Image: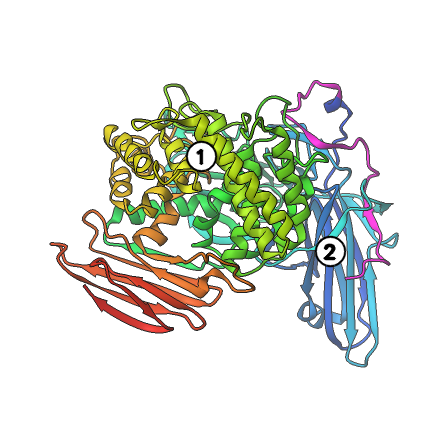
Amino acid sequence: MDFSNAKWIAMDPDSTILFPHIHLLNAKSQEARSLKVYAMPTFYKSFNIDGKVRKARAYICGMGQYELFINKDKVGEYFLTPGWTKYDKEMLYNEFDVTDLLRKTAKKHVDIKVMLGGGMYDIPIKGYHKMAGSCGAPKLLFCLHIEYKDGKTRTIVSDESWTAEESPVRYSSIYAGEWHDAGFNGKKEPVVVTKPKWPAASLIKQQAGTFVKVNMELPFQKLSSGLYDMRQNCSGIVRIKVKGEKGRSIVLRPAEILKNGSIYQKCMPQYEWKYTLKGDKGGETWQPQFSYTGFRYVEVEAEEGVELMELTGLHTTTDAPEVGTFECSDTLFNKIHTLIDWAVRSNIVSITTDCPTREKLGWQEQNHLMAYSMMYRYDMHALMNKIADDMAASQHANGAIPTIAPEYTMFEPGSGFEDTPEWGASFILCPWYTYLWYGDDSAIRKHYVRMKKYINYLVGRSENGILSYGLGDWFDMGPNRPGKAQLTSVALSATAMFYYELTVMEKVAFHLGKDVDRRYFSGLADDVKKVFNEKFYTGPDKVYENGSQTGLAMVLYTGLVTDSTRLQTLDALVRDIESRDYALTAGDVGFRYVVQALQQNGRSDVIYKMNVNDKVPGYAYQMKKGATSLTESWQAYDNVSNNHLMLGHLMEWLYSGLGGIMFKEPANDLGKESAWKHIVIAPQMVGDITWAKTSLNTPNGKVSCHWTRNTANTGGKIDVCIPDNSDAEIHLPDGRIVLVKPGSHSFSF
């Protein structure tokens, strides 16, 4: 879309620009005092339609977030538009077909209204803030292109002819909440014609699959006076209907958990939604427009004379379609699937966040570690490509990939949070996984030079092939409270990830026909493998380093084991788990590899035993403590997030191991094909589970697997459906492998 005739408009000129935002900015600091508190603006434009409308499309970029109305009707179903980006490099715009809205206008008169909120663009210092700063005043770029049936056209653009006024949104913060005064009437003034601080930033159309919308409504149960329970911890907002005198207010304070019968806001300090009434006798309905959080409970405080007529929870999540289903005979594993799924859906906005409460940041390790878990449930194609774009936009001049992208704040040097190999690995692995899953190599081609630059940065940080910096296996379960790795050295996990990235870059280079680079990456990988085994191999007992679950699993999964140490390593991993009564110790980085190393080596029986145990921290333990969404810590501590994405790695096993649906990664190049061209059906039937039913919409079509077995485990049946343009290997429990073509097939064993 050509915005060339449109002008950026604002209500105020830009004041102090503070970007990247400052982490945990002190409100009394000089930087904080320099920040202007911008009033939230509303922009207006009116015009008359000149004929019968054939087609009309609106194009809009509102920084940081916007809502567009035509004749009082909201345009689009989305929330928090446009998506979040690194604003000095990229901004997103949205396109809407508004033909029907213009056709139904009475007397051919059109009123356009645009309301803006700060989003991640302008984060006020008032209230809790993970970070604070500003890219400038909220601003708007708009174009409406109308085609009439007689062939004439008309274009309405943002310019000096618009007016602006202070919005009834009196306060909005992505971290602290929102206040809407329905009785407030601003004074219309001329707009300020302006420009973003970074005029060279690319303006890019936001893609379907990266939007946020209200996905479902959830009812509340009243627990006591002023306290309500939604019975599900999830991302979202509320909708209220209230009645009372003009100027009276109602305040709603959300929380994830209760403590001593009251809301506990440790992870969202003082977050609140406030609504001031305009006095409609029939009642007034309102929901926040520019701020959301994660919550289950709501405390309501209404001024005298205000009646809360209705309270509804609105769960906000991705617009990406659901693609996978899973169900089995064991209700515990069905509940685990639901537990993880609520964390996934609560943390997919226009980026993947760690939590919907205190941070809302795009921590990068979860994007590769949770990639397949998320892909089994949702169409992540567009979002994975955006994630790669966000990392590219956030890459430092020296090649480093920060731990968060978009990099909205820069963490303190030496803290470990500014740059960690296991986090930066997403820049290599996510584009590769996207290629395998969807057959789309556009991110690989687009970012190859930058990916190689990141590898060379890691080479420069290494000492004789060993990387020894970063956070390591974050939130593993050692003797101390969780945080930085306790049981596995940073050097082991960082170097194992480095090796894995090199092997993937070798495949990427081969795919792109870059043979010199392929040999370069292959040679580096061989060197790293050699020095890794020299440094970390400790003998047949612990095998690698101190024999931690994370260390052993990463070595197995990444291929760092030698032929002579493979069985030793697997035995040591199983032995450690069994010695702990099947308790896990791996954290954010390691647990995915524990699950995958066991699955790939035929030990799903161990995975099963680890996850039915509710006496030690894990999924079952979290639910026993009342969790309805995956928590940040295995121990479900109440002072950290209780809706967190990073530990949901069992989802991948539920579909690929227990459910039995996988693709076969080829030894050679895929070309333009998705890896789902060659499907593997290999359910691992474990414990007392007697059936599982799994389906997945792949790029080639829907694949399904439904297996059953009798309670004595002496026989059973597998029914599969293979989509067109795919073939499959069916691995039966009796050891047979059957090759099949597209269609429905049934096998007894």
Q: Which residue occupies the foreground of this view, 649 or 240?
A: 649
Q: How many marks?
A: 2
Circle 2: is it few (<14), some (14-19), or many (20+) Cα within 10 Å? many
Q: Is residue 355 visible?
A: no
Which image quarter is the C terminus in?
bottom left
Residue identified by numbered label 2? 60
- Magenta span contains residue 28: yes
Disc 1: which residue: 588
- Residue at the location (30% across, 49% down)? 334
Q: Report how far apart the C-alphas of labels 2 and 1 lie in the structure.
A: 38 Å
Residue drawn at 32 percent across, 56 percent down: 660
Residue stretch in magenta: 1-30
Q: In this picture, is 497 found above or below 434?
A: above
Compared across the picture, whether 5 is left or right of 313 comes to right
Location of residue 7 in the rendering, given as x and y in whole percent from the top left corner: 85, 52
Labels 2 and 1: the sequence-earlier one = 2
The percent position of residue 579, horizontal first and vertical second, equals 24, 28
Image quadrant holding the N terminus, namely bottom right
Amino acid under disc 1: Asp
Q: Secondary structure at mark 1?
A: loop
Q: Pinpoint residue 420: horizontal percent, then vertical percent.
A: 56, 31
Left or right of 417? Residue 33 is right
